[in-house]
Image (cartoon, grey):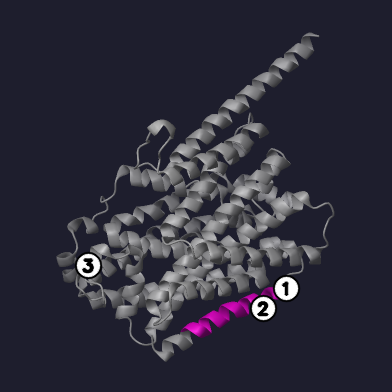
Amino acid sequence: MHIIDYVIFVVYMLAMLGVGLYFFNKNKTAEDFYVSGRNMSSWHIGLSVVATDVGGGFSIGLGGLGFTMGLSGSWMLFTGLLGAWLSAVFLIPKVSHLGHKYKFFTFPQIFGHFYNGKVALLAGIISAIGYIGFTSSQVLAGAKLASATIDGLNIQTALIVMGVIAVAYTTIGGLKAVIYTDTIQWLILIGGLVFIGIPVAYNAVGGWEAIKETLDPKYLSLTNVTWYQILNWSVTIIPIWFVGMTLYQRIYASKGEKEAKKAWIIAGVFEWPIMAFMGVVLGMLAKVAATKGMFDGITNAASMDSEMGLPILLATVLPIGLMGLMLSSYFSAILSTADSCLMAASGNIVTDIIAKFSKKELTHKKELRLSQIITLLVGIFAILLASQMQNVLELMLYSYAFMVSGLFIPVLGALFWKKSHPKAAFWSMLFGGATTILLIITENKLPLGIKLPEHLDANIYGITISLLLFVTISLYHNNKQENQNGIQNNQ
């Protein structure tokens, strides 16, 4: 990179830190820190939602899918569109009212309302673990991008730089800083892709003729995907719209139900088709460049890390100045997800875990300071975790799967099934999440040599176990209660 690119990039990073500093003195309470005073507009919320959900992991991950399977990789974010619109219709009308009425900060507080404190505590632990992993995936995405585009920067150093910046402005600025930086970052990313990344890369690889000559025709098809890939994406991504802590925080932060619904509609459209096709097209262009031998030191496109194709493409084809702008665009995407996930994990730990064991009520000032300290500590741990991982999309989807398999069924039961029972929620969360993690570790292998179909995501089995336990235990306790009431009435 040229000195001009470095200057552009450094100025961008300082601007993000400046937003955090601006809101530092405006946060007076934990409510300001976690839900932005509950008065955000639909456009700010909508752009923040899509920036968080698509963000760096999916941006880099989508590039990897475009590199390996072409346009069909866009179907992954179509499930995001479905999830956004389904939650706008079914979830927001219930959650928005409760959040404003009871002044909720977090998703597990819904469980405390419908079930009990024990269930809410377990939900908080599961959500916190999932979002720490998700934060790590974003830091890793940023490190991959930085190490591929900045000469002499290794991935471990990049992890530290990315992590420190994201953790710093999130810790000092809270959710309002996160939402406003998300809006800025999202506009920068879209502008960078539309006006810089795609047109420059398209011309550099030789245009449409080069694409047709280099890529297998299946890359240009929307049918180069198996039914089980779509099923796996659907079961992992759609439910996150019903259990994602980052999303509940934004529902609570919206002025009301109407604004939240509008925000979710906006987010869905930006996810698919806009970001979905931008991401996979850039990944395809990277595959063309790699196949044509345009990347220094890479002679075999099939053997390289598919997620590195996009950042290497940008480093190869972008001229001085534009490289700095495009790099800032992608860092925007990464930071916009990392900061939100960091806020989610921090909120879970402070509100859903520490508060359960605290014997005395904290003042607003002390609660705010505790929130900032925990955010800092969680961020440091996420950086350490990222340093041990290699694949962004894998880490991100595993974090999704762990939360979804444990939390999805109980939240549906709480909101839509009157026979739901707290014990059913607790055990279905525990065994649903544990099943998914166990199958991920063993690669779908069970004791006694039993092996489940490899092409189905472990999350499918985890949700199935969670559903069976939830329904069975709920019906058992309802029948037991009915029998006891019948005996008492007969007496």
Residue 163 visible to an observer of this rendering: yes
Residue 419 at x, y = what percent?
Answer: 63, 28
Nearest to the eye among marks 3 and 1: give it.
3
Q: Is residue 184 left or right of residue 481?
A: left
Determine the secondary structure under disc 2: helix
Please report the residue visible at 27 percent of the width from the left and 69 percent of the height from the top: 285
Q: Quadrant of residue 149?
A: bottom left
Identify the residue position indicated by label 3 in the image.
300
Q: Residue furthest bottom?
A: 3
| Magenta residue span | 9-25
- Dots 2 and 1: beta carbons under 8 Å? yes
Q: Earlier in the sequence, mark 3 or mark 1?
A: 1
Please report the residue visible at 33 percent of the width from the left and 56 percent of the height from the top: 73
Please report the residue visible at 49 percent of the width from the left and 59 percent of the height from the top: 53
Q: Is residue 276 magenta?
A: no
Determine the secondary structure under disc 3: loop
Foreground: 403 or 391?
391
- Tell me the tag on residue 324: none
